[in-house]
Image (cartoon, rainbow, N blue to C red):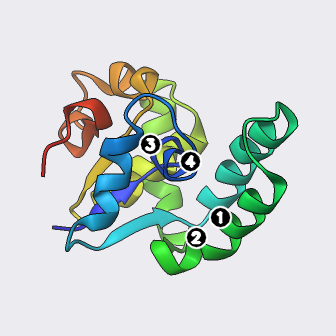
């Protein structure tokens, strides 16, 4: 099964915080990991905050960003816009987050996210079955 990972999961691959072990465990699986093409920008934003607050070395950020495309397959955004538009309008979730959900729908995959707000925001909607909280993941 293909898994979609969002920036909240990808960022945990590069520094320690709750559920980091689970996030890194996804890298050990024999599964295709994909993410929409905007994810590196979101991950870069998160990692830059870590560099500025002194919890991540600048070199670690550079290494993470350069290696990201070797770790996950980047899905082009153009094919996700229609579904992401429906998701964001109907649920109020951000368009950025809706792109991850749209990727899961398009690939008939499961989105693994550490974003509890996203999981709560889509609870009870037709998109809820496409999401799984990282804390609930078990291979």
Q: Please name the residue that numbered disc 3 is placed on.
A: 86
**Which residue is found at the position 60% from the left and 57% from the top?**
39
Image position, residue 45 (x, y; %)? 75, 45
Image position, residue 5 (x, y; %)? 40, 54
Image position, residue 32 (x, y; %)? 29, 74
Q: Label 1 to label 2, Cα distance in Å?
A: 6 Å
Q: Please name the residue that numbered disc 4 is placed on.
A: 11
Which callout, 2 or 4, points at the residue further toward the start of the chain? 4
The N terminus, quarter of image: bottom left
**Which residue is found at the position 81% from the left and 42% from the top?**
51
Reply above or below: 139 against 116: below
Q: Label 3 to label 4, Cα distance in Å?
A: 27 Å
> Marks 4 and 3: in contact by CB < 8 Å?
no
Q: Please name the residue that numbered disc 1 is placed on.
A: 64
> Marks 3 and 2: in contact by CB < 8 Å?
no
> Marks 4 and 2: in contact by CB < 8 Å?
no
Q: Secondary structure at mark 1?
A: helix
**Which residue is found at the position 70% from the left and 69% from the top?**
63
């Amino acid at each position: 099964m293909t898994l979609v990972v969002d920036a909240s999961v990808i960022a945990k691959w590069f520094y320690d915080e709750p559920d980091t072990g689970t996030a890194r465990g996804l890298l050990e699986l024999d599964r295709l990991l994909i993410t929409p093409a905007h994810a590196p920008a979101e991950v870069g934003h998160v990692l830059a905050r870590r560099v500025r607050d002194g919890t991540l070395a600048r070199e670690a950020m550079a290494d993470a960003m350069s290696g990201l495309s070797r770790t996950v397959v980047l899905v082009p955004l153009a094919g996700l816009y229609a579904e992401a538009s429906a998701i964001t309008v109907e649920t109020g979730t951000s368009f950025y987050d809706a792109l991850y959900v749209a990727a899961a729908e398009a690939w008939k995959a499961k989105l693994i996210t550490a974003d509890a707000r996203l999981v709560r925001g889509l609870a009870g909607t037709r998109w809820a079955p496409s999401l799984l909280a990282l804390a609930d993941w078990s291979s």
